[in-house]
Image (cartoon, grey):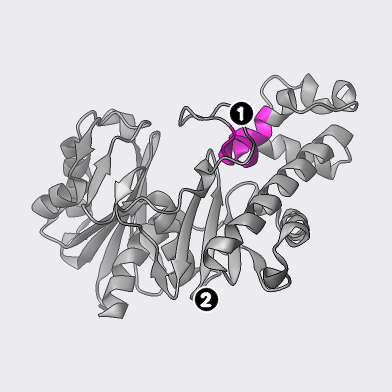
Amino acid sequence: MNNHYALGIDIGGTSTEYGLVSQDGEIVYERDVPTKDYPEPQQLIDAIHADLLKEGYIDSILGIGIGAPNGNYFTGHIEYAPNLLWKGIIPLAEMFEAKFHKPTILTNDANAAAMGEMIFGNARDLKDFVSITLGTGVGSGVVVNGEMVYGHDGFAGEYGHIRIIPNGRLCGCTRRGCLETYCSSTGVVRSISELDSENKAISALLQMEKPSAKDVFDWADRGDLFAKEIVEFTAETLGSALADYACFSSPKAYVLFGGIAQHGGDFASKVKHYMEENLLIIFKNKIEIRVSYLHDKNAAVLGSAAQLFWNAIKK
């Protein structure tokens, strides 16, 4: 594999990112295109192929790894992804193989992120861990004994949609109280209007037209009392949830990734504190909270490509 690259592709509702990744995690070429510019999946496949053919990379591609919302590892299908224009069941892996004539693996985007952490990131020394992506939503990839947990149908690991507060905030999945409605970047922004506090009226956040999760953390760093409450509430909610989830797989570590996690040690240490406070006694002081090493890289592309390398390693 020394002279070949994996083509890593991350398909999102807004953009699709793709790149060629070496076995040691170097991205030698990358691009992103608006997903909505391609109302049919075959159009996107043709465009990626044409670009890589023009750049002279086609013959260097070892295989293709794809991360996508509602991506099913077992079938290679995207199944009823609500945030994509492509509706129903899309046999995407098969379509890429037909165009590129290369082996193709497709999985859920959060599982791809976990694979990226295990091959290139902050979980290279771990066989039992859970990656937690804190982005627009909350995703998770569960690894047990060095193997990704897919479940019987390919959709295991939806920690973001475990309900933590009965009849809580309405989620995009149509249910109420899901973790991602509180601990995603979207959830942090919702807390500005939905969290009660006597410090709310004097907060700089209320003076902003469209505050972001980053604004909340930035103002918390500057001493804004309401912003600090939101950060503390988010860490407590996430830490408490991770304490409960430990009962499932007893991970050695949770690896946090995403804009919220980028605030580094301070937020991670808060999450660790609240997790320890709520852990079953047999798990106490055994589980680490780590922050991803991949923030300054195209983690989505690396994670998608990592699936292919991991399959080759296991063989």
Q: Earlier in the sequence, mark 2 or mark 1?
A: 2
Kind of residue indicated by mark 1: Asn
The quarter of the displayed image where residue 295 is located:
bottom right
The image's mark for residue 167 is 1
- The answer to whether mark 2 and mark 1 are in CB contact below 8 A is no
Q: Position of residue 22 (x, y in %)?
A: 34, 70
Q: Is residue 189 left or right of residue 223?
A: left
For mark 1, give the secondary structure: loop
* Residue 298 shows in this picture: no
Q: Is residue 260 above or below residue 23?
A: above
| Quarter of the figure that contains the N terminus | bottom left
Residue under the image location 56 percent in, 40 percent down: 163
| Quarter of the figure that contains the C terminus | bottom left
Q: Is residue 138 left or right of residue 105?
A: right
Magenta stretch bounds: 177-190
The quarter of the displayed image where residue 232 is located:
top right
Residue under the image location 16 percent in, 50 percent down: 96
